[in-house]
Amino acid sequence: MKFAPLAALGLAVAAITAPAAAQDAPAAPTAPASLFSIETPIEALVADARAKAVLDKYLPGIVQVPQYDMFKALSLKALAPYSQGMISEELLTKINTDLTAIK
């Protein structure tokens, strides 16, 4: 797959973080979350061999595109609107299923 359309991501991407809200009571225990999802930054997915294998399965060559450094901090979900349809909702669903299965 060619990711030349991702060159549009040359615009600055800023992450906004909100301060954590104080909690009066401890949170109820929850089920362990999966390690990865389509909301995980791409660079974190690439850093794990299992998650990278999922990327290679559905988006072969994504780390070789020249614009990788510009979008690696984004999640696949955030990157999808800039992919000119190459990262569809259907593809995101398949990727997310495989990523969330990683424990």
Image (spheres, rainbow, N blue to C red):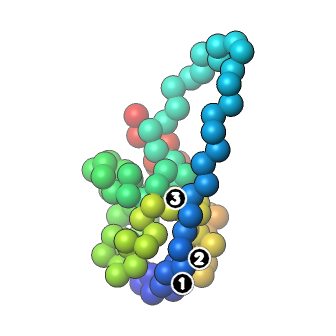
Which of marks 2 and 1 precedes in the sequence? 1
- 28 relative to 8, above or below: above
Q: Residue at x 55, y 68 (%)?
A: 13
Question: Dot 1: within a 10 Å radius of its alpha carbon, few (fewer than 14), some, or many (20 or more) residues?
Answer: few
| Residue 94 on image: x %, y % | 54, 56
Residue 28 against residue 32 in the figure, above or below? above
- Where residue 20 sits: x, y (%)? 63, 34
102 relative to 78, above or below: above
Please state which amino acid type lies under the numbered disc 3: Ser
Asked whether residue 86 appears in the rendered view, the answer is no
The type of residue carrying mark 2 is Tyr
User: Which of the labelled discs sits on residue 8, or is there none?
Assistant: 1
- Label 3 crowd bin: few (<14), some (14–19), many (20+), radius 10 Å: some
Q: Residue at x 55, y 52 (%)?
A: 39
Quarter of the image for the N terminus: give it. bottom left
Q: CA distance from mark 1 to mark 3?
A: 16 Å
Mark 1 vs 3: CB contact within 8 A: no
The residue that mark 2 highlights is 82
Query: Mark 1 and 2 residues: CB-CB less than 8 Å, in contact?
Result: yes
Q: Secondary structure at mark 1?
A: helix
Question: Which residue is the extreme one toward the left?
Answer: 49
Frontmost of labels 1 and 2 is 1
Q: Is residue 38 visible?
A: yes
Residue identifier under label 3: 75
Which residue type carries mark 1?
Ala
The mark tally for this picture is: 3
Marks 3 and 2, how far apart in space?
Answer: 12 Å
Q: Quadrant of the C terminus?
A: top left
- Quadrant location of residue 24? top right
